[in-house]
Image: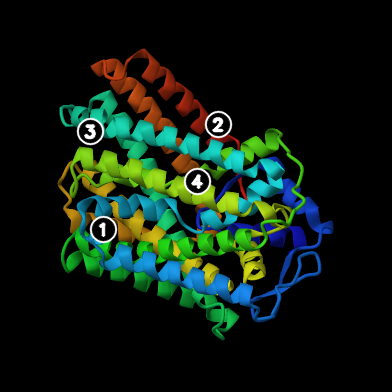
Amino acid sequence: MDEGTYRAATLARASHRTVIFSAPLAAKLNRQTSQPSMLRLVDDGFPSYSPCFPQPSSDPSEAFAMIVIVAIAVAAVVTLLLTVGPIARSETWRATVTPLASIIGSGFLICGPLLAREFGAAALGAMAVLLLLAYAVGWVIRFNIAVVEPLAETLRLHDPFAWAMRVAQGMLGIAYAVSVAYYLKLLAEFGMKRLAVPETIHALVANIVVTAIILLFVALTFSGSIRKIEHAAHGSVSLKIGIIAGLLAALAMWWLQHAGDTAALPPVRVGWGSVAMLLGLLITVQGFETSRYLGASYGRQTRIRTMRLSQLMSSAIYLGFIALLTPFLGQAQHAEGVAGILDIMTIVASALGIFVLIGAAASQLSAAIADSIGAGGLLIEVSRGKLGVRGAFLASSALSVAIVWLTDPFQVVALASRSFALFYAMQAALAFWASLRSGAGGRAARGGFAAIGLICAVAAAAGAPAEG
């Protein structure tokens, strides 16, 4: 495998979400073999630093120590508040956890380098545009919760609208099943990185680990209800948000300590390839649609409110992270995936590398749990209530296990990525249709649904997997 192909594949495998890239960008990544990689992998699978990026200082200075202390303190406090505080016991937070877990994964770690590479100093503005698009798609899903759900309850089995809903749900079901297998496969690979597993049985061991985790999800469901698996999501999300808060606090401390320093920012770059890549990055902020399929546990208004809350919280985290990365945009444009952010954070303070590693692992687990919940809720709705929570989770888990053993998730992940984008386009079409049938929303809303559907269709059609 040549270096360019290896770098593109590494980027795809390091991300929380599979990112849809434009075909020109995939080719561009493969052409950039002349640029020195900011991070090389040594024989034990861990990163070593190349001369093109400053090596982190090993000097245990007071400034570095203060950054680490603040990061650990903030991470611990936030994790405890979200785990055992009054917030943790509220229904609002429990309903927010699932979409929030799916939205925020290690995708937030890779967005900085990708946007810096494609947009230069305009990375923060590009992130804002991406989040606005995601919020607009969320508006469509929230409309469907309020309008399409009650409409669906009155439809005949063979009503054309009912068939359109089933097609969209089938597409999402495939995407969820592949996603769960993919995230857990990444988690297994990540966990085995330091284990001396022979190459001949590496794939077998990974599949066994993934299957065991999926069976654990099923066991949690059969031992109680959806609340059990939500508790697992709750714990992983609390840890993940705590880690993110610690990283943000560390970057903020670095800003305070280097207030007078100036950093050369890369020039602003905007082109069709960059725009296509930005549309592809919609998959990194995907996940809010899981609220649509939690109807067995939460009422419509609760799901609408908590979906909006999860999008606002995740948007604040994404924008804060990109903004605080501004002094590092010059270096970040050469970074590759989670490993690149690991480089940057170890420059801020050497000990912060462990934050990135823990955060990336927690991201994979929480995203898999969230999509398992979404898949179960989806099957309950598709079966028109004939499947209970346990039966739905068993069916969706069986499909994920089949995907783990019968395919390589990296080969089929493009299907999941396009399925999510097409699902959003179809949800916009359903919202448009429902507005015409019921009169809800009016002409302005229908114009918005049409525009959002077109953008999502373009995102699906113009994308190419990073594996390339």
Dot 2 or dot 4: first in sequence order is: 4
Q: Which residue is mark 3?
A: 149
Could you tell me which quadrant the N terminus lies in? Answer: bottom right
Measured Cα–Cα span from mark 3 to mark 1: 29 Å
Measured Cα–Cα span from mark 4 to mark 1: 28 Å
- Amino acid identity at mark 3: Glu
- Amino acid identity at mark 2: Val
Q: Which residue is mark 4?
A: 283
Q: Quadrant of residue 64?
A: bottom right
Classify 10 Å Cα crowding around label 3: few (below 14), some (14-19), many (20 and above): some
Dot 4 or dot 1: first in sequence order is: 1
Q: Of the numbered discs in the image, which one, if any, rests on residue 29?
A: none
Q: Is residue 250 left or right of residue 175?
A: right
- Amino acid identity at mark 4: Ile
| Residue 149 placement (x, y as % from top left) | 22, 33
Measured Cα–Cα span from mark 2 to mark 4: 13 Å
User: Do tag 2 and tag 3 residues touch (Cβ < 8 Å)?
Assistant: no
Taking the spot 21% from the left edge, 44% from the top edge, the residue there is 295
- Amino acid identity at mark 1: Ile
Q: Is residue 147 above or below residue 305?
A: above
Classify 10 Å Cα crowding around label 1: few (below 14), some (14-19), many (20 and above): few
Taking the spot 49% from the left edge, 33% from the top edge, the residue there is 456
Q: Nearer the viewer, mark 4 or mark 1?
A: 1
Q: Which residue is mark 1?
A: 87
Q: Is residue 425 left or right of residue 386?
A: right
State the residue lying farthest toward the top: 443
Q: Which residue is mark 2?
A: 458
Indicate how the structure is coloured in the image: rainbow
Measured Cα–Cα span from mark 4 to mark 3: 24 Å
